[in-house]
Amino acid sequence: AQTVTQSQPEMSVQEAETVTLSCTYDTSESNYYLFWYKQPPSRQMILVIRQEAYKQQNATENRFSVNFQKAAKSFSLKISDSQLGDTAMYFCAFMKRSGTSYDKVIFGPGTSLSVIP
Amino acid sequence: GAVVSQHPSRVICKSGTSVKIECRSLDFQATTMFWYRQFPKQSLMLMATSNEGSKATYEQGVEKDKFLINHASLTLSTLTVTSAHPEDSSFYICSARETGRYTQYFGPGTRLTVL
């Protein structure tokens, strides 16, 4: 069974600084996807960034980038130029792919990020 | 972008009554929808996966007779909490996966309070 671990329950960062959130996962699968989701105080889940395991290049989305280390089963999220609106719970997530079908998404326990003015 | 709506956003009911929560994909067809439960400061716990036109697949430990899921069309799934009790009070979130694609889009959630 796959598991997702986030070892930092809470983090804080000064506005405009850079912060990195850690995520590790355990799987024996070779074909899968990884995600970072953001859940602000409104509790609406928002997809921040995604990574296909078969791609070596790290995904980037504006101020958000990942460091995907497949052999180490590590998938960290870097937020540059942190903004007050980045304050939220961040969930790392894993999804297995089987042929043309996609499995359920498995979420990590989350990291609560606070951006300090 | 893809939008998923949930109705109602908040519901308060008396113990022993049933409550229905609707989840709709507004601008895409969703063969698969998911229902999650989330307690304060915790992660999302998958309750069940529903595929249009077939029975839902429940996760271990989730009572299928208590949490009835219906996915009768490609844009609508419903979760009915039957004979609700205070311990069923929680935040329920649905998500929808567009047919043929893997990304899930989430609804805004429903806060259920059982008195």
Image (cartoon, coloured by chain):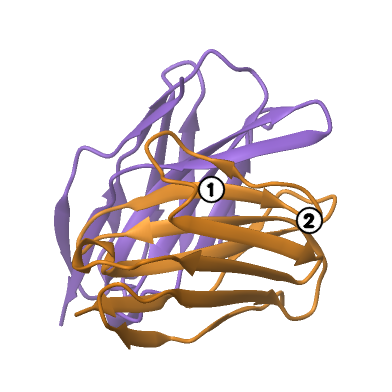
Q: Which residue bears the numbered disc 1? A: B48
Q: In 3D space, how far apart are the residues under numbered discs 1 and 2 (Cα atoms)?
A: 13 Å
User: How many numbered discs sit on the rendered protein?
Assistant: 2
The residue type indicated by label 2 comes to: Glu
Left of B44 or right of it: where is A8?
Answer: left
Chain for mark 1? B
Q: Quadrant of residue A39?
A: bottom left
For residue B11, above or below residue A113: below
Chain for mark 2? B
Image point 64% across, 47% down: which residue?
B56
Q: Which residue bears the numbered disc 2? A: B52
Q: Quadrant of the N terminus of chain B?
A: bottom right
Image point 26% across, 78% down: which residue?
B113
Left of A60 or right of it: where is B39?
Answer: left
Image hue for chain B: orange
Q: Quadrant of residue A51?
A: top right
Q: Nearer the viewer, residue B95 or A42?
A: B95
Contact, mark 1 vs mark 2 (Cβ under 8 Å): no
Q: Label 1's element?
A: strand
Q: Label 2's element?
A: loop
Judging by colour alone, the chain drawn in purple in this rendered image is A
